[in-house]
Image: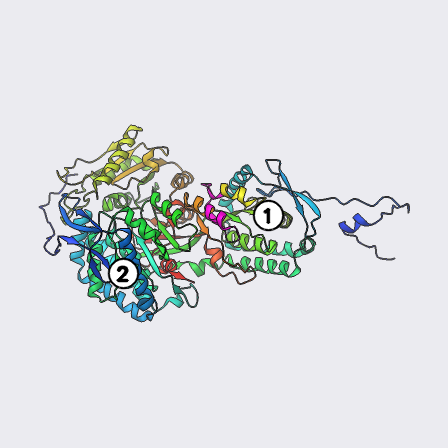
Amino acid sequence: MSRFEYAPAPESRSIVKLQPSYGLFINGEFVDGAGSFKTISPASEEVLAEVAEASTADVDRAVKAARRAYEDVWGSMPGRERAKYLFRIARIIAERSRELAVLESLNNGKPIKESRDVDVPLAAAHFFYYAGWADKLPYAGFGADPRPLGVAGQVIPWNFPLLMLAWKIAPALAAGNTVVLKPAETTPLTALLFAEICQQAELPPGVVNIVTGAGETGAAVVNHPDVDKVAFTGSTEVGRIIARAVAGTNKKITLELGGKAANIVFDDAAIDQAVEGIVNGIFFNQGHVCCAGSRLLVQESVADQLLESLKRRMATLRVGDPLDKNTDVGAINSAEQLTRIKALAEIGSAEGAERWSPACELPDRGFWFAPTIFTGVSQAHRIAREEIFGPVLSVLTFRTPGEAVEKANNTPYGLSAGIWSEKGSRILAIADQLRAGVVWANTFNKFDPTSPFGGYKESGYGREGGRHGLEAYLAG
Amino acid sequence: MPAKKKESADSVASATRVTAGGVATAPRLAVRKTYKLFIGGAFPRSESGRTYVVADSKGQFVANAAQASRKDARDAVLAARAAFGKWSGATAYNKGQVIYRIAEMLEGRRDEFTALEVPAAEVDEAIDRLVWYAGWTDKLAQVVGGANPVAGPYFNLSSPEPSGVVAVVAPSAPTLLGLVSVVAPAIATGNTVIVITDAPRVAITLAEVLATSDVPGGVVNILTGSAAEVAPWLASHSDVNGLDLTGLADAKLALELEQAAAETLKRVRRPAAAPDWSADPGLAPMTAYLETKTVWHPKGL
């Protein structure tokens, strides 16, 4: 199949007004931090801005501001008033959606069509959804008079910077908590723009505090003795460290960690739809998705046919400028992540799996990795066991439904899974047996503010989204 | 014809026996019970061959109870994991009936527990608590799960599912109510459990109740002995999904166990500050070891 040629259709950057440097957002204003670091565009390696790095003392200031705001204003504010602030924020995110989308794609490297159509609208929807809960908490099923916990310390990853911020801040605020949030080191800019949105919404100072920095800043947030609640999304490795750090304290904790999702295609699946789902499952957001369908389990009888279709479809993926509206696969978020993806891909070849990528030209500058599949993968291969967090799909086959379930569950992770079949009873039976928090049947990578998200086993605990997502921020 | 006097085992022990021929013989010696472990539906001795002396409240020797070892703990994990698939897959109605059956059996054996110095009121409460949890099995999914109104043409349903194998440190007191209060919620939601207890007589007598209640082997496994010795192996075991420390009074041990559990990201319930085992337990003991599974499917013609 030939590839359609498109003229470049870049989204204009002019809507984003980058400042040369950004401070920390503490107690409603931007203040200097102890140090600073540069944040770049992973697509060009261009420095976008200088961002403050919060020290332990800076984090302490932020926690104190959050505590004051909790005690003086936010914790005791009637729910219906809190709700209106959150509705305001939802509206401002929608009003400034183009600016947020461009900034997100610039700083993260994700295609503009994803930040525009997925990340930003979902972030706005998340605030809109939880806004409505703020004055209805006694009806949420967590006791007749559920109380907020106090100050929430939240640490989020770089794969969906604004959306993860929304997942964390919206339920925390709706429940009456105040927050200190640390965005990922490589993607601080939309969080800082969100700080400005809080100012526009006239959110009381200290209710939301944003402390930028790397791992040490995150550790300072998590370990601060006056934090009542820790919420983390990121790697299972760091999740273990955090779970250990909060052991023996009174801090409530939720963790949304790694995954190695099986995407199972049965012989009675609609193959073309399944191919679209597989592509969406692993190449959406460059595969930087904890719930990515990174292990394709395909029934042996349709494997050849499916792989042929998949390869044909992959050849049409457009890799390149994240701001180009035609781009399907953007830049890898950082040099560090690219190194990790390359290393695991090398291991995949070395362990005997067969590697394939479509012919695709990658830009000279920035961090890029072509969409890649490995066939002939066994369960023992590291690329079948470890989270690659990149556009790399490991293909395994199975003969019986029982074998599919066995292989799908053969992982310490349990975040998500996919099932492709036209037979309803089979879908429901398999869905019952999969040990995963989200099961997408004949679809993949769908998210909604009303739908709880989170994992089994070592993919973490607690749920974000929906009524379930409130539990993490309430004392029953 | 005068009714024959029925004699309990204990009274037989102290009474002078009279043979059919009316000749008096020596007092009958009681047949004592060996207190072993309860693993996979069987009552094995500790693999280690160790026992420890159990005394009653007056300090009188009553038994040499099995002292569980690391190997016993690992065997219990194997048994609990093996039982998990069938038990978690059993219908909610069936699980409710089985737990109700435990209550029935406990009611019938209440004298055995009062003979072990468990207050009658505590036995009552333990039975009633089992009945309470029996009724929850087919209701909880409707209370904590449900349809999610997503913004698109999708069927979207969240349902609770058990976390898996849960290791529990049973409270030292109250022995029976404490044990029932930590085991019943975990199995009512479809988990399988391994309980460590230092009250071997009550725990193993309860195991006999369980063994005659249609509870499949391996759903509840009981290790008698030292939590400080055995619990760390369960806290760090990578095939254990949850750890219940609500009944553990030793804060230092609880901290170590929670830290060990962090390595495999187990769901941990921390020690309760002042546990009141007779209070309404609420939903927390059940929801602690539940996962939420959300299934999506497109709608279309």
Vertical order, B279 against A264 (above or below): below
Residue A130: x and y in percent read: 31, 63
Q: Secondary structure at mark 1?
A: loop
Name the quarter where the N terminus of chain B is drawn.
bottom right
Q: Which residue is mark 2?
A: A208
Q: Are marks 2 and 1 in contact (CB under 8 Å)?
A: no
Q: Is residue B212 left or right of residue A413?
A: right
Please tell me which residue is depicted at 76% across the width and 49% down the height of the picture. Answer: B9
Q: Which mark is residue B198?
A: 1
Vertical order, B73 against B134 (above or below): above
Q: Is residue B164 left or right of residue A11?
A: right
Which of B186/A221 is in front? A221
Dot 1 surroundings within 10 Å: few (below 14), some, or many (20 or more)? many
Which of A110/B68 is in front? B68
Q: Secondary structure at mark 2?
A: strand
Q: Chain of mark 2?
A: A
Please tell me which residue is depicted at 57% across the width and 55% down the height of the picture. Answer: B178
Dot 2 surroundings within 10 Å: few (below 14), some, or many (20 or more)? many
What colouring does the structure picture have? rainbow
Share a chain, discs 2 and 1? no
Magenta region: which residues? B234-256
Can see residue A448? no
- The amino acid on which the numbered mark 2 sits, given as a three-letter code, is Val
Q: Chain of mark 1?
A: B
Measure the C-alpha gap from mark 2 to mark 1: 48 Å
Q: Which mark is residue B49?
A: none
Name the image quarter holding residue B65. Answer: top right
Can see residue A311? yes
